[in-house]
């Protein structure tokens, strides 16, 4: 049985046991389709769960892997992402109403950030939408359940197919990513502009090469058939050896997102789609950690696009899309009351917490490095008054600093503003850690590097 057949079989088993196939995104944990190639250097033999797939935590050391996107490049596995094909005469109309971005100028091979809202203007899902043909699109996200739910509510001349078990996604990010992939494909890839993609043959295997920027650096994604995953992984690793490529373990994957100022679904906010019947368990697993205590229940973990830096620059457009009226009302009130910023945490306060096990006294919650697993929301105060929430606290070996994102009241969002982050769960010996507001991203944005001169 092929890898893709095994993936489909596991999916079908859950369906036959009573799961609703239309909205099923939570599957039994599987190894990556490239597990055999990955296991060669997985000397620690440890794994982390990324949605329904188990990935090696580390290959060499997390510090080395967490800096590869700046020093050379990495090869990482994002196969866990949910992938759905939308095809048919009314596919574009459906996707245009589902997402807040204008799709009227959308060329084949182009990639767009597709932010989907609920009726209250809160982010229900966000991911990457690729146009593969005149009437064919692929949406890739942490979960596509909101898309599936919305599609089920109407009768459209289109079809939606979950292609997750059949496709892998590998990331190759960093200044050496272009040279690595050009060697692997045996030809130039410099015609691929940012947020564009095209087919190529890599070691004789058909793949789609897409230029993306999840690391804030020059970078690409490879999409292909599951049964080819192991061969593609091995070929890219071999091609990148002379350029210093590193395999990226699950432990280090989130570091780059915080450095680049990118809020991650399920980690830095919770999608409002979790209120949808049949919503995936991966976004409802356990309780978020941290010091933040919601006053309005789970909705306090939801965010509007403006709070995450995804709002409209020229005002809310007149075209129809789900959540438009809520965004227009927000704009009439002067825009979102909060905005996304970066926080640089005071190094002495962090050091004191990290070394607390060496001293007497009450022990606060410890900091995992480079970051705590799962979603953690920490209260941000100014003068003892709550003004925001910090997420994604990360020890960055590139920045040589502890940093995080924060959705904070606009009056305290100016760079240089001092704040305090409350560290530790309620009921534990909490610490107040000084931090300073900074603009995002934390390091230069190199996603749109001109490749013609490299």
Image (cartoon, rainbow, N blue to C red):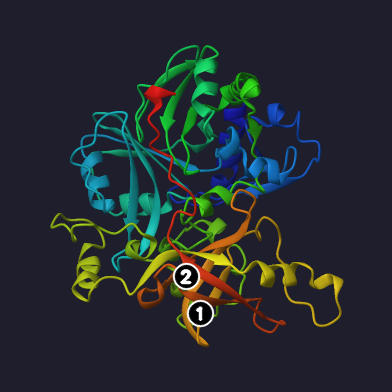
Give the alpha-carbon distance from disc 2 to disc 1, as whole Å: 8 Å
In this view of the protein, can residue 83 be seen by the observer? Answer: yes
In the rendered view, tell whether residue 381 sits above or below residue 378: below
Residue 256, image x, y percentages: 55, 48
Of 453 and 142, nearer the camera is 453
In the rendered view, tell whether residue 328 sits above or below residue 190: below
Residue 72, image x, y percentages: 59, 32
Q: Residue at x 39, y 61 (%)?
A: 308
Label 1 SS: loop
Q: Residue at x 53, y 35 (%)?
A: 174
Residue 27, image x, y percentages: 58, 47
Disc assigned to residue 294: 1
In the rendered view, tell whether residue 298 sits above or below residue 214: below
Pointer 2 or 1: first along the chain: 1
Q: Tell me the residue that label 2 is attached to.
A: 301
Q: Residue at x 13, y 58 (%)?
A: 318
Quadrant hosting residue 33: top right
Quarter of the image that includes the C terminus: top left
């Amino acid at each position: 049985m092929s890898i893709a057949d095994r993936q489909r079989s596991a999916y079908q088993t859950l369906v036959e046991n009573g799961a609703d196939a239309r909205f099923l995104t939570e599957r039994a944990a599987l190894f990556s389709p490239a597990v055999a190639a990955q296991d060669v250097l997985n000397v620690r033999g440890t794994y982390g769960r990324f949605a329904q797939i188990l990935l090696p935590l580390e290959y060499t050391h997390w510090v080395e892997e967490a800096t590869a996107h700046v020093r050379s490049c990495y090869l990482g596995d994002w196969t866990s992402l949910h992938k759905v094909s939308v095809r048919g005469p009314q596919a574009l109309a459906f996707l245009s109403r589902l997402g807040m971005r204008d799709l009227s100028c959308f060329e084949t091979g182009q990639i767009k950030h597709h932010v989907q809202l609920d009726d209250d203007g809160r982010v229900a899902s966000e991911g990457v939408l690729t146009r593969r043909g005149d009437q064919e699109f692929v949406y890739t996200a942490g979960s596509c359940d909101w898309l599936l739910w919305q599609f089920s509510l109407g009768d459209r001349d289109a079809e939606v197919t979950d292609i997750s078990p059949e496709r892998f996604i590998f990331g190759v990010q960093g200044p050496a990513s272009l040279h690595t992939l050009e060697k692997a494909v045996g030809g130039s890839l410099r015609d691929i502009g940012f947020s564009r993609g095209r087919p190529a043959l890599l070691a004789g295997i058909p793949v789609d090469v897409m230029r993306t920027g999840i690391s804030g650096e020059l970078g690409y994604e490879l999409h292909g058939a599951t049964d080819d995953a192991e061969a593609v992984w091995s070929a890219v690793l071999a091609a990148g050896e002379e350029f210093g490529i590193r395999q990226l373990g699950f432990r280090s994957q989130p570091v780059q997102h915080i450095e680049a100022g990118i809020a991650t679904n399920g980690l830095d906010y919770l999608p409002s789609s979790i209120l949808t019947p049949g919503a995936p368990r991966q976004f409802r697993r356990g309780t978020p950690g941290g010091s933040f205590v919601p006053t309005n229940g789970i909705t306090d973990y939801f965010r509007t696009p403006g709070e995450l830096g995804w709002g409209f620059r020229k005002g809310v457009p007149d075209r129809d899309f789900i959540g438009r009226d809520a965004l227009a009302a927000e704009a009439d009130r002067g825009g979102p009351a909060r905005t996304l910023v970066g926080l640089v945490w005071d190094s002495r306060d962090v050091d004191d917490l990290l070394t607390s096990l060496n001293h007497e006294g009450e022990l606060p919650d410890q900091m995992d490095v480079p970051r705590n697993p799962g979603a953690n929301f920490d209260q941000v105060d100014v003068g003892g008054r709550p003004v925001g929430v910090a997420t994604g606290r990360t020890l960055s070996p590139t920045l040589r600093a502890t940093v995080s994102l924060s959705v904070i009241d606009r009056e305290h969002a100016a760079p240089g503003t001092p704040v305090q982050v409350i560290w530790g769960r309620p009921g534990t010996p909490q610490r107040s850690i000084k931090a300073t507001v900074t603009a995002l991203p934390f390091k230069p944005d190199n996603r749109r590097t001109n490749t013609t001169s490299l």
